[in-house]
Image (cartoon, rainbow, N blue to C red):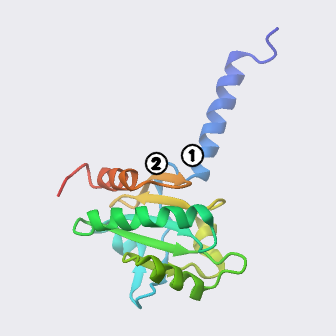
Amino acid sequence: MNYFPRSKVTFICALVATVLAVSCGGAGQNARDFEVVQFNGDTFRLSEEVKNHAVVLNFWYPSCPPCRVEMPAFEAAWQELKDEPVRFLGLYVPQGVDSEEDARNFIEELGLTFNFATDRLARIAEAYDLEYFPTTFFIGMDGNVVATHISILETEEIVRQARALLGGSAY
């Protein structure tokens, strides 16, 4: 017995794919602009950064086990890419008992050298429809989200995605 005509199944599949692409900031979606003061005191405004750099934007918090696991991979990728036109921003989103001091201590403990800031009141996470941690957005120099990853990333994948943002250049 066929309860659903093929056209309805195709329509439902297309609808589900569209919803997933939008909720995950799928390819081609314009990245939401934001401005934060980084832990080093400098201002980071996405619309200004993407004029000359690709951006790797990672949402995290200190007591998130997968966030803790992946941070060394982000540092290793940053060390490999820091001379290329790419910026990394670790955006701490306050969750539960974690404080900004906990975030800063974690960064110091691991010796992380890329840029970090706090998403006060989680407004940026809300604008990006964030549901899970860690989540990483790869944003091209055109201001569009090229890829979104939910869960732990390895160094090689971060480097591969960042270089893809740069058009595959090896610099």
Residue 124 rendering spot, x and y as whole percentages: 57, 72
Mark 1 to mark 2 CA distance (whole Å): 7 Å
Q: Observer-nearest residue: 86 or 14?
A: 86
Image location (x, y in percent) of residue 64: 63, 67
Quarter of the figure with residue 5:
top right
| 139 relative to 21 in the view: left or right | left
Give the residue number, with chain letter if any, for mark 2: 27
Q: Is residue 121 left or right of residue 148?
A: right
Disc tally is 2
User: Which amino acid, by three-letter code, is at mark 2?
Assistant: Ala
Residue located farthest toward the front when viewing the structure as drawn: 109
Earlier residue among tags 1 and 2:
1
Corner quadrant of residue 128: bottom right
Count residues near mark 2 (Cα–Cα under 10 Å), then give few for <14, some for 14-19, many for 20+.
some
Q: Which mark is residue 21?
A: 1
Which residue is the extreme one toward the left? 171
Going by the picture, which residue comes out furthest to the top? 1
User: Going 47% across and 54% down the picture, which residue do you hit?
Assistant: 153
Does the CB distance between marks 1 and 2 fall below 8 Å? yes
Q: Nearer the viewer, residue 114 or 111?
A: 111
Measured as percent of width and height from the top left, residue 78 is found at 33, 67
Identify the residue at image location x=46%, y=66%: 57
Q: Position of residue 47 (x, y in %)?
A: 40, 71
In the rendered image, the vertical position of residue 13 relative to residue 75, given as above or below: above
Placement of 11 over or under 56, stated as above or below:
above
In front of the other: 28 or 84: 84
